[in-house]
Amino acid sequence: MSGVVVVGGGLAAGTAVTVLRENGYAGPVVLVAAEDHLPYERPPLSKGYLLGDDPIDVVYLHDRAWYAEHGVELRLGEPATAVDRAAGVVRTAAGELPYDRLVLATGAVPRRLRVADESGRPVSYLRTIEDARRLRAALAGAPRVAIVGGGWIGLEVAAAARAAGAQVTVHEAAALPLLAVLGPEVARVFADVHRAHGVDLRLGSAVSPADLRGADHVVVGVGAVPQTALAAAAGLPVDDGVLVDAHLRTADPAVFAIGDVANVDHPVLGRRVRVEHWQTAIDHGTAVGRTLAGDATAMTAQPYFYTDQYDLGMEYVGSPGLAGYDRVVVRGDTREPRFTAFWLRAGTVVAGMHVNDWDAIDPIRALVGQAVDAERLADAGAELGALADEVAAG
């Protein structure tokens, strides 16, 4: 008897099978994963686990007994090798798995960097549990760590390396870390925080072999590449991910794609978007699980991500996209740092974030996507929650 086959072992895949069962789907469910691990989430790998605050077990969605109790067949350490859409089967080295509906959650892999790989120094890329274990051990014994890439992964690793007592240098080609995401007004805050914690930021130039010779360990965080080979070989359209509609359905109505690999025609943003973040994996897995259980659910949530670095915690909602923004409104003191920031385009909030202001996230969510008077938003005397209620009321 065919049912749902989910290919992938990350948070999106694990959420999908969970929501399927929670919403009453009674057919067969098989989860096929290349890694020999129970489905797990990745944020702790660069946060709590890498810092030494959390055991590795915190990454797992469920224990093995949960899958048995809920009738989810696990095929771990068994990579999917092909999809035959005409026959409705997924092929693995162990045989064929028939499906009525197929969910591709194949994720992404770190982008390689030749200058690092050929540096002659030990090099780490952070994606899997094994990567995190090796890197945690390396940081404990590497007094000089060079990090290539000043994005979220690079900066979180920098914070963990400093906590381990390492000397840390971050090489970033842009003028500021996170510049493309946050713009100069807010990216500067993260640069200042890392410098205050002793990180040597080398900004505005490409890393060279000479830059890495003195390092005891090199960490590369220069983005990720969606794993589309399985979908492409099956004849599904791909372009920076597997192309899916608002319900995460591919060109084949029996095949869905979720998580890091999915390039979604987002009905709220009005454009395609592929997001490699924790909340998106949950949202995608939830939406496809509900849809396959009979409750068609579109992917309408705005992108969300968060980070923890030293004593700085941040949550961000929205996506300015290539069109960008024309104004930034900052409320609070960026030097503390405790503030909120909003990015506006033509009077509409396209993104918002807070730093160490945890009560602000709900009104930020409410304001993103809304037309807001920028001067009213900038007024520190206007309480944010009341402003969000006012905008919602029209």
Image (cartoon, rainbow, N blue to C red):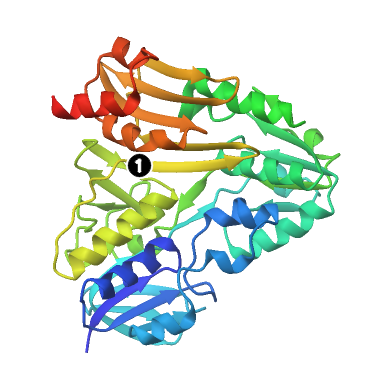
In terms of image quadrants, where is residue 127? bottom right
Asked if residue 56 lies left or right of residue 59, the reply is: right
The amino acid at mark 1 is Pro
253 w.r.t. 246: above or below: below
**Which residue ends up furthest to the top in the rendered image?**
375
Residue 335 % position (x, y): 60, 19
Instruction: Tell me what residue is drawn at x 72 percent, y 57 percent.
Output: 136
Dot 1 crowding, Cα within 10 Å, few <14, some 14–19, many 20+: many
In this rendered view, identify the residue nearer to me: 269 or 92: 269
In terms of image quadrants, where is residue 282? bottom left
Question: For the N terminus, which image quadrant?
Answer: bottom left
In this rendered view, identify the residue nearer to me: 228 or 298: 298
Question: For the C terminus, which image quadrant?
Answer: top left
Residue 84 % position (x, y): 28, 75
In the rendered image, which residue does mark 1 sit on? 303
SS class of the residue under badge 1? loop
